[in-house]
Image (tube, rainbow, N blue to C red):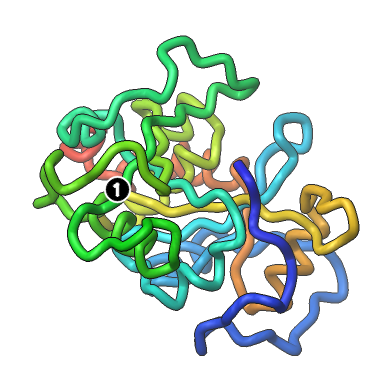
């Protein structure tokens, strides 16, 4: 995925003004604080294992997306994780039948939302695609294929079966009682080579913008120690 750079060059919504609060040493935020922020419609920075992709993603619930929020994160390859069952209902198949991606990120055929979309690439158009994917009333006929939004197929069982950002996005939605549909984008540094943002880079970015930051490890542990946090009926469909 092509990530969003750590830069001030793009428009920033009012709730994402740079923060003057800087941590004196590295620390993750608590899962409880992160879930509260996510439920309130805020972005989270989620980092994975240093021995896996060793990267950070911005993640937000698709149902909480706005045009301004999309404009803030748009300098990258925006993806929209969804449960496989919902993708099947929307007739959005895999991009390639034999997934050769190193970490088995499950890219699907790209889509645009059919109604009100112009070229598909603007913040407004990608907002419409994200909201359409999150809408339980959307039908396959509401989308054109290919497009500019990249749905990702989450693995059943979430983070307990695959420790990826795709599954993290869906688990975060379910843990906060929201429709299981997310929007994410990877982070890169604002340097000459556009290097990937690693753990400490992501912490600095989260501090700057007043965002909560957690790890995949934390979310996995939370799910293991809170087995009832996601309802059984929900899990049966996921």
Most foreground residue, 130 or 176? 130
Most foreground residue, 90 or 225? 90
Is 163 situated above or below 129? above
- To which residue does mark 1 refer? 180
Which residue is pictured at 22% across the width and 45% down the height? 143
Most foreground residue, 129 or 88? 129
Query: In the picture, residue 108 is in which quadrant?
Result: top left
Is 18 situated above or below 115? below
Which residue is pictured at 31% across the width and 62% down the height? 118
Which residue is pictured at 59% across the width and 47% down the height? 218
- Is 63 left, or right, of 138 in this rendering? right
Q: Where is residue 236 drawn, in percent x and y?
A: 20, 30
Q: Where is residue 33 drawn, in percent x and y?
A: 52, 68
Is 193 situated above or below 163? below
Is 148 situated above or below 14? above
The quarter of the image holding the N terminus is top right
- Is 78 left, or right, of 208 in this rendering? left
């Amino acid at each position: 995925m092509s990530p969003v750079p750590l830069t001030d060059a793009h428009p920033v919504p009012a709730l994402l003004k740079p923060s003057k609060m800087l941590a004196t040493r590295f620390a993750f935020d608590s899962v409880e604080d992160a879930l509260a922020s996510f439920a309130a419609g805020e972005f989270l920075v989620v980092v994975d294992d240093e021995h896996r992709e060793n990267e950070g993603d911005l993640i937000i619930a698709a149902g909480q997306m706005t045009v301004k929020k999309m404009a803030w994160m748009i300098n990258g390859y925006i993806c929209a994780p969804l449960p496989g069952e919902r993708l099947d209902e929307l007739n959005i198949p895999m991009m390639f039948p034999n997934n050769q991606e190193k970490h088995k990120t499950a890219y699907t055929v790209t889509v645009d939302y059919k109604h009100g979309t112009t070229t598909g690439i603007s913040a407004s158009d990608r907002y419409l695609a994200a909201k359409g994917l999150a809408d339980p009333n959307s039908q396959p006929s509401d989308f054109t294929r290919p497009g500019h939004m990249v749905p990702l197929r989450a693995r059943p069982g979430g983070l307990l079966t695959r420790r990826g950002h795709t599954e993290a996005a869906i688990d975060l939605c379910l843990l906060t009682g929201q429709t299981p549909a997310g929007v994410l984008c990877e982070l890169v540094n604002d340097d000459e080579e556009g290097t990937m943002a690693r753990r400490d880079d992501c912490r600095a970015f989260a501090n700057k913008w007043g965002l909560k930051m957690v790890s995949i490890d934390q979310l996995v542990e939370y799910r293991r120690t809170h087995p009832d946090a996601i309802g059984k009926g929900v899990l049966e469909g996921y």
